[in-house]
Structure formats: C-alpha cells, structure tokens
C-alpha cells in the first residue's frame, strides 16, 4: 500500500492547497450557539501550559450547564453549519470547519500518517510511556524500540486512575510520538506512529523528498 | 485485625446510611434506595490476609486465577491485608503499611461508562473522608482529588488502577486504599507528613468496625456513580428530563466532594508529579461538571486539569 503512494501527486496536492481542513464537532449533546462566522480568523490554544484558550468557536448548553468550546488549531473558519445555531445537536455532530495553513513539518507528518500504523488514544486522558518502554527509549531512542502486539506500552492517566495500555497493531519500531507527557490527548487522536522495520527506508525517502521539494517552512 | 469485617454488617450500614440520607429531606433528588442497591455489591465478598506484598498485585492474581479456572471474581470483592510488605503510592512513592492500618483493594468490574469511571477516584476519596469523619476526625478535609488531610497530615491515600485480565480481556478497576488507623508510628521520611486516625480522635479504634463503616461509605459512593449515570442516560434518551441529582443539576458525587474539600479557593502548586516536578502556581477556582479541576494562573487564564496533583501554598487570608 505505502509503496504505491504517488509522491509527485501528493506533493502537487499539498503545493496547490497547503491547508488542513479540520472539522469541529459537538463535544456532547446540547443546544449550540455559534461565536464565529465564515471567514473568522481563529487562534489555537497556547501558553507554556496550554492555559490560554483558543478563540471561542461555539457555546453548548446541556442541563443548564453552558460550556464554551475553543479552537484547538489556528486558521480561518471555512464553513459553519449555521442552520444549527440555537438548535439541539447530538454529540459528534459536525458544526464547522477550520482551514489550517500547513507548515513543512506538518506536511511531512501528514504524509507519514498515511504510511505509519497509527496507535490512537482509547480515552481522553494523559499518556506516558510504560516504565519498561521509557527506559528502553532513554537508552537507545524511540526509533530503536520495537513493540509487539500485547506489549504494555503506555499508561493512561485520568484523575488519579492509571490504566495500562496494551499495543495492538503490527510489530514495528516507534517512529513518531504524537503526545507529550502531561498534555491531554483527546479520544481517537494518534499517540504513536509505528513503522514496520521493512518500511523504514520508505519513510526516510518521504522525509528527504519533502524536505528537498518544499522550498520554505510554510 | 481484631475480628474479620462481615459483608452483612457492611450491607446493614449501607442501608442505614441510605435511610439516614432519606431522612435528611429534599436537599437533592438522590434516590437513596436506588443508590444503596447499585452499591450493595461492594464488600459482598471480603477476603482477609495477614500479610501481602501489595493488595493490588493480589487482586490481579486473584482475577487471573479465577479466569483461568473458567470463573470470574465477583465485582465488589474486597481484599484486606493486616500489613503490606511492598506498598507504594503513585510514581512508586513509598507507603508505610504496618499492622494497625486499613490496607486493601476493591475489585470492580468495569461496567461504568468512561465519564463515570473517571470519577471513581472521587468516590473513594469521598468515602474515606465520610468514614473518618464518622469515626470522630471531623476536621478531615479532601485535597484534590482524594488525599485525606487532618491537621495538614496525610491520613489516607487512594490509588485506582485499570486492569485487563489476559484470558478473556475483561476489564476491572482496582481501587487501592490505605488508611492510617491505629498505626501511629511512621518512619523518618514520613514522620511529620503522615498522621493516624487514632491520633486525630485521641484513642485506638476497632479496626474491623472502621473497615465496615468505610466499605459502607464506599458502597454508597460507588452506588452514586451508577445512580447518576442512569439518570443522565434517561435524560439523554429523553425518557425523562431529570439529569444529575445534585444541586442545580450537577453530579451528586461532585457536590458531596465540594462539601468535604477545602481545595477550592486555595493557592496551590500543580504538577503531574508535584514533588519531583512542580509545574506552576495557581488558584483553584472550581470543578468542571465532569470533575476537571479549574485553575487560574498568574496571567489570569483558567485551565482545566484532569490529572496530576496539588500541594497547598501558604495562604495569607486563612
């Protein structure tokens, strides 16, 4: 599959439209009211501890508990389902889309995500490598650590409940780490990109190619 | 332990608690009998050991051996140990567990939905605080999320770990508890930061009696998680418009936590492992509806934390 990727086509696509289109969904059921319109510029969450909220996108009210939801990514609001304004929505309903300008590093990561086997967060929580994996990473670096199905690779921490997370997927090395210890990861977001040993040369080729063909950081 | 805590006594205390809550009047819309019925599985099987390395480890072994034999551990089973040889807290911190304290683990099959499962640490903390207050340590307070403090000393520690047994993949929550009851002497590194319930109330307690009270409180608060989950589900499916049973539609367990805690309003230092790596100072301004802690930082920004721990900073206004 990965060997069949047409890099020329992929790079042409990213050069023609160097944006990510990030859909924003209702975080839970409730009555929604939008705080942005099409074309609004939005800022992502920021600050050393990610304590500065992003631009408020919408407010959702469930059981007299209003909650504002802020942008997690910067960009421009490309579309808004304004017909839902003031109406009751189900959890997960698509509300709007943000057009996010991609940097070279993000383009490489996006392409790699199509090649790597992604291991995603089972719950919204904070994640840490298990002690065994962490000590192997400390000694050799992540890309020298091979994981097998059934390995305890992470600890998921929520409040004060720690749960071991077992790897399920193809055997491979830890190529990309998408989480930072102590920073919350939403359910379904990728935590790790695992690469089968025979695909490593292909990965290197992708990185070299994008770096060579992309003449600026933006 | 002076005698073995009895499941029947735990159940009796649980229903007495439900009756007492019922008589308190219409402060909330909690259905006390339903809560007691949901929680009644806690402590229905109590296994006592004179000495264990770790109660959590024993719980894992029990789950595995039952699964291997084609059976299953009953949800609500409690393991109690007279003493623990290898007790530890989070981040492998040392926990001193000699005879005289209440050391153990509750095994819960993971039948709660994730938002309710996330609140198990609150349930065990509230239960611990209610039990020690009933025993006479009325000034005990909860520090987020479930540290029990009496006169600044740590009276108890709780740890919740998820576990998936390898034979059938069934998931459990292991609720570890360690309460300093009659063990008044602490080794050098803990002296000054730990305190025993016997010191707080001015005399030794009957450990089995206290264990039954604690397990009844734990049963009540675990029952409250199921009760609130059921109410929210009925509301979500539009079978009723009731929502949570706490004041102004909030979760009843979090409302109870607020009553027992002095964390909100305090200046704190926050960190994932606050002793080894403190991250920032902030003021606690409240709880999110789902249990997250709201912290206001020096720049005025308010952030929610669902993980990590706190230490209080000296507060000039107290």
Image (cartoon, rainbow, N blue to C red):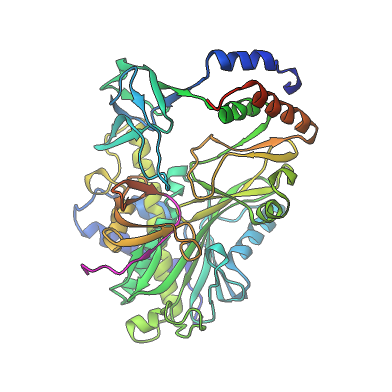
If the image is split into quadrants, where does the N terminus of chain A sit? top right
Residue A89 in picture, x, y percent from top left: 34, 24
Q: Quadrant of residue B179?
A: bottom left
Above or below, B294 against A177 in this view is below
Q: Name the chief secondary structure element in magenta.
A: loop
Residue B150 in picture, x, y percent from top left: 34, 74
Residue A80 in sight: yes
Direction from residue B260 to residue A136 in the image, left or right: right
A210 part of magenta stretch: no
Above or below, B134 against B22 in this view is below
B316 part of magenta stretch: yes
Frontmost residue, A7 versus A89: A7
- Which range of residues does the magenta coloring cover? B306-318
> Given the current orientation, which residue lies at the most extreme right position?
A198
Frontmost residue, B167 versus B145: B145
Q: Residue at x 67, y 24 (%)?
A: A212
Direction from residue B285 to residue A142 in the image, left or right: right
Frontmost residue, B157 versus A209: A209
Residue B193 in picture, x, y percent from top left: 42, 77
Count how many numbered circles sit on residues in the image: 0
Residue A94 in sight: no
Above or below, B186 against A16 in this view is below
Direction from residue B184 to residue A134 in the image, left or right: right
Frontmost residue, B44 versus B236: B236
Above or below, A90 against B270 in this view is above
């Amino acid at each position: 599959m990965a060997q069949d990727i047409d890099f020329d086509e992929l790079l042409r696509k990213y050069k023609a439209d160097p944006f990510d289109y990030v859909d924003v969904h209702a975080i839970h059921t409730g009555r929604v009211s939008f705080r942005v319109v099409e074309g609004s510029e939005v800022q992502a969450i920021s600050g050393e501890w990610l304590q500065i909220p992003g631009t408020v996108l919408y407010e959702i009210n469930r059981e007299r508990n209003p909650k504002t939801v802020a942008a997690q990514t910067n960009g421009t609001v490309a579309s808004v389902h304004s017909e839902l304004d003031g109406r009751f929505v189900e959890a997960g309903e698509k509300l709007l889309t943000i057009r996010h300008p991609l940097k070279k590093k993000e383009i490489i990561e996006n392409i790699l995500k199509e090649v790597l086997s992604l291991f995603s967060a089972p719950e919204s929580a904070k994640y840490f490598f298990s002690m065994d994996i962490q000590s192997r990473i400390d000694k050799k670096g992540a890309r020298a650590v091979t994981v097998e199905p059934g390995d305890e690779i992470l600890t998921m921490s929520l409040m004060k409940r720690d749960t071991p997370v077992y790897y399920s997927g193809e055997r491979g090395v830890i190529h990309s780490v998408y989480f930072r210890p102590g920073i919350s990861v939403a359910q379904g977001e990728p935590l790790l990109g695992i690469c089968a040993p025979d695909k490593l040369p292909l990965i290197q080729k992708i990185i070299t190619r994008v770096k060579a063909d992309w003449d600026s950081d933006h | 332990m002076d005698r073995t805590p009895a499941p029947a006594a735990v159940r009796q205390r649980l229903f007495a608690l439900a009756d007492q809550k019922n008589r308190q009047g219409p402060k909330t819309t909690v259905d006390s009998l339903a809560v007691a019925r949901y929680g009644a599985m806690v402590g229905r099987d109590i296994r006592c050991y004179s000495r264990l390395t770790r109660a959590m480890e024993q719980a894992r072994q029990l789950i595995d051996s039952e699964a291997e034999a084609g059976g299953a551990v009953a949800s609500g089973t409690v393991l109690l140990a007279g003493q623990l040889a290898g007790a530890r807290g989070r981040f492998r911190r040392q926990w001193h567990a000699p005879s005289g304290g209440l050391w153990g683990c509750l095994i819960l099959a993971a039948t709660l939905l994730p938002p309710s499962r996330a609140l198990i640490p609150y349930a065990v903390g509230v239960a611990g605080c209610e039990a020690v207050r009933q025993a006479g340590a009325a000034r005990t307070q909860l520090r987020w999320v479930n540290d029990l403090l009496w006169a600044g000393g740590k009276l108890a520690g709780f740890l919740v770990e998820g576990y998936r047994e390898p034979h059938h993949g069934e998931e459990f929550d292991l609720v570890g508890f360690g309460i300093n009851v009659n063990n008044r002497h602490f080794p050098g590194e803990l002296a000054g930061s730990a305190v025993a319930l016997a010191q707080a109330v001015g005399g030794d307690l009957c450990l089995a009696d206290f264990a039954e009270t604690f397990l009844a409180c734990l049963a009540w608060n675990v029952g409250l998680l199921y009760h609130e989950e059921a109410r929210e589900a009925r509301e979500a499916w539009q079978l009723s418009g009731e929502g949570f049973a706490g004041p102004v539609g909030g979760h009843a367990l979090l409302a109870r936590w607020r009553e027992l805690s002095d964390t909100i309003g305090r200046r704190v230092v926050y960190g994932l492992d606050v002793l080894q790596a403190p991250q920032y100072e902030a003021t606690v301004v409240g709880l999110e509806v789902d249990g997250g802690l709201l912290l206001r930082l020096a720049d005025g920004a308010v952030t929610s934390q669902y993980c990590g721990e706190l230490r209080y900073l000296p507060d000039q206004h107290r």
